[in-house]
Amino acid sequence: EAVLLRKAIPDHITSNLLVHITQPMVGGCDFFMDCESGFIRKIMVSLEQVFFGAHYTVLTTDVPSDRMYFIKKGRVELMVEKVDKSLKVLRKLDANDSFAEGCLVEDWTNNPFIARTATECEMWTLKRSVFRNLIRDFPKSRSLLKVVAKSVDARRRASVHNTMKAAEI
């Protein structure tokens, strides 16, 4: 992707290709649902492509994430560690799903879940630093995402807390 799209093809064509490739993932993301179209387009052209093999741990609870992940192909499981150190699956994610959006608007000290690939995966990531640079130019989206982040964070904490309580039983 980096060599072909970013170096060998003119910028205006590269942008259009990136939008075409990433639109289903970003367009389907609830986190960005009501954001300005110019902001969404800038996100689409700022994503970086990564590949992971099956059963690869993308996020651990120990190393805080600095990026959001969009799944283009493959399956990812979000899990929590139970008291007995075994893992409990919270959610199974497929193509066009995303995770770790909370780390874009706040600096996580640890991840609220573990993310592991169930199959080989193609993902696209949005770094926190890139997101914060982009959001400066879009005040409407910035205020909207603050509200969305609080709502998502409260639901995530409740979901993780309830799952961990259930895992203790």
Image: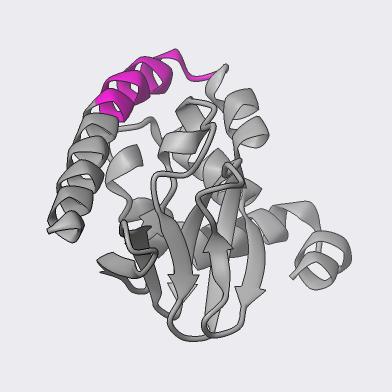
**Chief SS of the magenta region:** helix
The stretch in magenta equals 137-150
The coloring applied to the image is: one colour
Quick check: is 142 in the magenta stretch? yes
Q: Please report the residue visible at 39 percent of the width from the left and 23 percent of the height from the top.
A: 141
Q: In which quarter of the image is residue 136?
A: top right
Query: From where the camera sits, is residue 96 visible?
Result: no
**Above or below, 19 relative to 147:** below
The quadrant in which the N terminus is found is: bottom right
Q: Is residue 142 left or right of residue 130?
A: left
- Tell how many labels: 0
Q: Is 149 in the magenta?
A: yes
**Residue 148 appears in the rendering:** yes
Q: Where is residue 116 in the image (x, y as percent from the top left)?
A: 47, 70
Q: Is residue 13 above or below residue 126?
A: below
Name the residue: 57% across, 47% down.
Answer: 62
The residue closer to the viewer here, 61 or 18, is: 61
